[in-house]
Image (cartoon, rainbow, N blue to C red):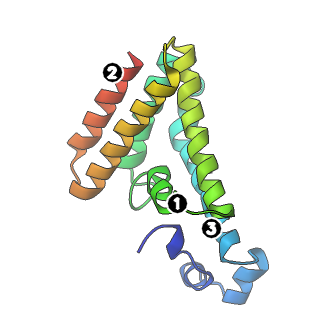
C-alpha cells in the first residue's frame, strides 16, 4: 500500500533503520510524519517541476517548460504511484485536519502557479484554463499509472499545451 495513510511510526522506523522511540523524538506522532511527508513532496515537486523553468520568461514560455517538467517528473518515477498531488488529493479530498489542509495547500499552490502563468500569457479565462490543464495532467497520470503507457503522458502534455496556446 502506498500513500500518506501507509505512513506509520513503525513503517518509518523499519524503512529508516531507526527505533520507533527514535522516530518519536523527531516527530511527535503519525500526523506530524504525514505533514512532513507533504512538505518533502512539495520540495521535490518544486525542485523537479517548477524550479527548472523559473528562470524563463513568465507566461507561455515558462508554462510550456513547467508542463514538460511535469511529464519528466512522472516518467522519472519520483513517487511510486505517479503525481503526489493527484494521488493525495483523492486520498485526502474528503477529509479534515492538518494533513488534509497540507494537501489542499499544496494543490492550491499548483493551481495558483498555473493561473498566474496563464494570466501573464494573456488567457481570457486563467482559472478555467488552469482547470483544463490540471484535468488533462491528472487524467494522463491516472492512465499512465493504470496502463503504463507513455502515450498517455504524451497525450496529456499535448492537450495541456493546446490550452497554453
| Residue position for label 1 | 94
The numbered mark, 2 or 3, whose residue comes first in the sequence reads 3
Residue 33: x %, y % from top left = 66, 70
Q: Nearer the viewer, mark 1 or mark 3?
A: 1
Which badge, 1 or 3, comes first in the chain's sequence? Answer: 3
Residue mark closest to the camera, 1 vs 2: 1
* Residue located at (56% from left, 50% from top): 44
Mark 2, secondary structure of its residue? helix
* Residue in view at x 67 percent, y 88 percent: 20
- Numbered marks: total: 3
Identify the element where label 3 is drawn: helix
Percent of width and height locating residue 61: 48, 18
Instruction: Please give the residue where the numbered disc 3 appears in the rendered image.
Output: 34
For label 2, the residue is: 162
Q: Are marks 1 and 3 in contact (CB under 8 Å)?
A: no
Residue 3 location (% of width, % of height): 48, 67
Q: Along the horizontal axis of the image, is 21 left or right of 86?
A: right
Circle 2 crowding by C-alpha within 10 Å: few under 14, some 14–19, many from 20:
few
Instruction: Locate the N terminus and report the quarter of the image it occupies.
Output: bottom left
The reply, left or right, for residue 68 in relation to residue 54 is left
Amino acid at each position: 500500500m502506498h500513500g500518506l495513510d501507509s505512513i506509520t511510526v513503525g513503517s518509518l522506523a523499519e524503512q529508516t533503520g531507526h527505533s520507533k522511540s527514535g522516530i518519536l523524538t523527531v516527530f511527535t506522532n503519525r500526523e506530524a510524519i504525514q505533514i512532513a511527508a507533504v512538505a518533502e513532496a512539495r520540495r521535490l515537486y518544486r525542485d523537479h517541476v517548477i524550479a527548472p523553468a523559473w528562470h524563463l520568461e513568465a507566461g507561455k514560455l515558462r508554462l510550456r517548460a513547467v508542463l514538460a517538467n511535469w511529464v519528466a517528473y512522472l516518467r522519472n518515477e519520483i513517487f511510486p504511484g505517479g503525481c503526489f498531488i493527484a494521488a493525495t488529493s483523492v486520498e485526502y479530498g474528503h477529509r479534515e485536519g492538518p494533513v488534509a489542509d497540507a494537501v489542499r495547500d499544496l494543490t492550491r499552490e499548483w493551481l495558483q502557479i498555473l493561473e498566474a502563468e496563464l494570466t501573464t500569457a494573456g488567457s481570457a479565462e486563467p482559472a478555467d484554463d488552469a482547470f483544463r490543464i490540471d484535468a488533462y495532467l491528472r487524467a494522463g497520470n491516472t492512465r499512465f499509472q493504470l496502463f503504463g503507457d507513455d502515450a498517455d503522458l504524451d497525450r496529456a502534455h499535448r492537450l495541456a499545451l493546446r490550452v497554453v496556446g
